[in-house]
Amino acid sequence: MTELTLLLRQWQRRPGRALATVASIAVAIGAIVATWIASDASRVGYRALAESIEGMPSVDVVARAGGRSDPSLAPKLVGIPGVRAAVPLVFRPSLLRAGDARVRDSAVGLDAAGLVEAGLLRLTAGRGCEGPDEIVLSQRLADSLDRSVGEEVLFFAKRGVRRLTIAGVAEPQSLVSFADGAGIALDLAALTDLAGTGGLVDRIRLVLHDDASRASVVAAANARLPGNLVAQVPPGRASMADEMLAGANLGLDFVTALTVAMAWFIVGNAMLMNVTERRRSFALQRVVGASGRQIARSVMAEAGMLGLVGALLGIVGGLVAADPIARNIATFLRSSAIAITVNPWLILAALVLGPLVAIAAAWWPARQAARVDLLEGLANVPPPASGVPHALMLVAGGLWCLAFGILAAAGAGWLPARAAVPAGIATLLAFIATTPATLGLLARLLAGLIPRRLGIERGIALEQVLRQPVRTALTTGVLVAAIGNGVGLGHVIRDSVDDILGWYSRALNADWILMQAGSLAVQGDASPSAGQGIMDGVQRIEGVEAAVPLSIVMGSLDGHACLLVARDLPTSGRLPLNAVGMSNETLRRVLEDGGVAIGTALARQAQRGVGDEITLAAFGRTLRLPIGAVVRDYMAGGSSVFLTRTTARRLLGIDSVDAVLITATPGAAAAIEQPLAAIAREHSLLLQSHREMRAMMDRITTGLVGALWSILGLGFVVGSLGVANTVAMNVLEKRRTIGLLRAVGMTGRQVSRLVLIESLLIGGIGSLIGVGAGIVTALFIQLSSQALLGHPLAMSIRPTVIAANVAAAMLITAVAAWLPAHRAVGLDLLDAIAAE
Amino acid sequence: MTLATPTTDPPVLVADQLAKTFAAGSGNGALVAAVQGVSFSVAAGEMVAIMGASGSGKSTILHMLGGITRPTSGRVLLEGVDLAALDDDRLAVIRRRRIGFIFQRYNLLPELSLVENVALPLVLDGRPERECRERALEAIAAVGLGPRAEHRPDALSGGEQQRGAIARGLVTRPAVVLADEPTGALDSANARAVIRLLTRLVADRGLTVVLVTHDPLIAATANRAIRIVDGLIAGPDGESPLP
């Protein structure tokens, strides 16, 4: 009881100390909660972004050799883990008339009412169509026809004309998940009847839960399907957003894990400060019979109690902080406000995590408290200078081995790409654990940059930094984590964005893109003559410099679903593809000689490389041929096969035109829009401008980068607290020295400078180690991205990212020094001199 | 080895060739011998004064006797148990049960009331709360501070704080009480009162006290005195005559 009384009285007597500790824990836990919630909000935002581009995550079940399938299979597929709904779909080109307005668009048949009820289809007005006489239009189409719910339109189909009532208007982004670009939705039975499919459907779309793995759903579905059906990732959508989402998730996981690590350092620092201030009390308790274990236990118990209080405050603070961060993320992602969802488990986890992190972080301070030298403690002298513990160096060695071990295992494919997260954290911790050994060299190096006229301040500050290398390492640890995080993720984000933008500018370099609005062909029902008609129409337009037709069809490579892209190569200049380990000239020769190139992700998935024989199936044909090249690609997540149109025609009979990349003569890009739009209307194609595509890419990349930086900024704010703590603790220890110096004439300004120099030295050391840690972390994540993308990202050193992080760190350390400096200047001289 | 004891009973406390060296602090690895092979023993119910000038090593000897610091060589036997051979936890148990400490600066925890301070060794020993309080109050009454039991140290005078520290030293009924310059921070009236209290406790309760002092008048109140000069016991027989 007296132990608890003692603790409570100590808090009462020095509330500032207890509050500082609680505040540290609250900030640490608040940071975890805020990061966690903001990460979840980011995931929601990214998912919304991905959905707006390519619909909800899904897997399609289609007939292997074309044709249709029986929708009664759908209920059997809903039981597959990760599947949210199985939606039978049928697509048909159609003509819609409302008054004098006529619009050609694709129609999709689906169970609209059921989807609306399940929350999978969102309407802006009305309800889902339920009978053969009702229709749902996308908002865009309803606006262009100037029609609203309750009004009628004429629907022209193969089997006649129907007068339909508009039952509802759908959010375009919601309809895209099922309609693949179509703006018209009819009841499934009504459209199958109008299309004369005999009740069969074109595909069954399996809508997945956000956290479901497409690969595992594909595998599970294929195991249940009859031989004539196959499950595959819907092709025809560039899955850049998906890939970026995977990368962003990796980043968010990393940031969240790192925040926990930072919390550990911050609370450790605060507890160490707390314990150092009470050395005399611990010594006295030891003298009257407390064992080291009892002291350690009391420190741990105190940490647990403060941890609980800090966690409660931190949860509140985290919830408050998460809101503006999430709003910031929503702004970056240009999405509607992201609703913050607070998982009750998160609150519970934070409540448990607070005391746990505090207790874990108090381990070292408790050990120090238990080992207080009784005589020094009673005399209240500062702890003596300490060396670098061998045990810590062993821990550092272990962490290095662990980090490289995980990386090697991930590289060999034994561990998933997400293993980059623990590997990155282990690397950062290894850097921090190694800090005491490198501290002397780095501190002296940095002290050399300080002007000679500040010799006294520099000397004392340097001695103070080196006096307790482990404690200094703990402080710099917070900064190393913040800077390592910033530099590491900054590099990864920029390199990823550059990689994707580089691919985009190579593969889709055109002023305008005409593409099929509906689903892609499994079999060649897009007739060559229609394609030729499109090409002729485009080439006749004045101002068109080049029109590159692309055939994009679904196929399989050694049983793996893939997208076959047939395109002609430009006679000169840059190729649209970037081969791995092969020059442009060689790649051109390979493709022109009738070879095929496959995407890196597909190569990794199928475990095939250049020269390996593969079985390629498409359009009902199967052939064996060698892989000519492996290329970096983001189409269908890199599960793509490239060949020239000549080769595609010769080997597979593919001659369709599914997309046309159109380049205008200089200055004519705007002028060709109208004639291209006319062709698009005539052939039910979508026309997208380079500007629109580029805006979409920019939206993704800006959103990604901005959202991650928002969360990273939090790390820096938290880091400042750690520095302020340690510098304050050093001031406390140096009371007598500072008192003596002031007594013999050192001015308050000089004392402030001393504290500032010490703080900046810590900031400089943290920056140097943090930059190194960040670059190595970036390297780790980028090497791990090979498992994600199939190819490693090109690593580059980015001075602006490094400079921004270092500047932020130095600014933070300078600001963090203010309070301790103020405290040092305000020391009572007699009191300070009597400290010993 | 010469062990001088006034009675034939087995000694409570034995210092056997105690030595302690410290690093010089100059950083060149030089060592300073603070205590150089000191041997003596203390019998039950005896009050022994260790005298010496400042820096002679007398406090270091006391710290070694109390297990606060370990000797570089030699042994400390408390009731036959070699303190130097114990690990930190077992040493802590010995300190809390069998040794009472009194310091020059009282060393009461400012956060606790007098009764809580006095009860602390018992609390650390895991005794029931009620027993801790009752025994603490009894010890406080024995030093004449009964009405001040609930006060915090900062509400007590220096003399009262030192009497409180004596009560804390007595509360576990230790085998020996070690007092390091117990009157060093007190005025002469309070100093006399504290010494009178200690001698009364020795006489009435059979308390065993080892007292470090540089004051010959205080040393004169002890049964005998050991004079320390430069870390060694002065005099051919290991003890100096009483002044």
Image: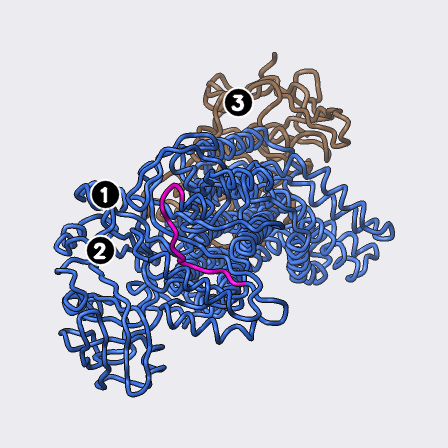
Chain colours: A blue, B brown
In the image shown, does B35 or A784 lie closer to the viewer?
A784
Examine the structure image and report whether residue A658 is included in the region drawn in magenta: yes
- What secondary structure is found at the residue carrying circle 1? helix
Chain ID for label 1?
A
Residue furthest to the top in view is B1
Pointer 3 local density, CA inside 10 Å: few below 14, some 14–19, many at least 20:
many
Please state the horizontal and vertical placement of residue A758, each as a whole percent of the image.
Answer: 71, 51
State which tag comes first along the sequence, 1 or 2.
2
Residue occupied by mark 2: A204
Nearest-to-viewer mark from 1 and 3: 1
Residue occupied by mark 3: B84
Please state the horizontal and vertical placement of residue A637, each as a whole percent of the image.
Answer: 42, 49
Real-space Cα separation, disc 1 to disc 3, in angstroms = 75 Å
Real-space Cα separation, disc 2 to disc 3, in angstroms = 82 Å
Q: Is residue B243 visible?
A: yes
The amino acid type found where label 3 is placed reads Ala
Nearest-to-viewer mark from 2 and 3: 2
Quadrant of residue A817 within the rendered picture: bottom right
In the image shown, does A764 or A271 lie closer to the viewer?
A764
Q: How many marks?
A: 3
The amino acid type found where label 1 is placed reads Asn
Residue occupied by mark 1: A222
In the image shown, does A308 or A62 lie closer to the viewer?
A62
- What secondary structure is found at the residue carrying circle 2? strand
Chain ID for label 2?
A
- What secondary structure is found at the residue carrying circle 3? helix
Query: Does residue A5 sit above or below B57 in this rendering?
Result: below
The amino acid type found where label 2 is placed reads Ile
The magenta stretch spans which residues? A650-662
Q: In the displayed structure, does residue A478 sit left or right of residue A559?
A: right
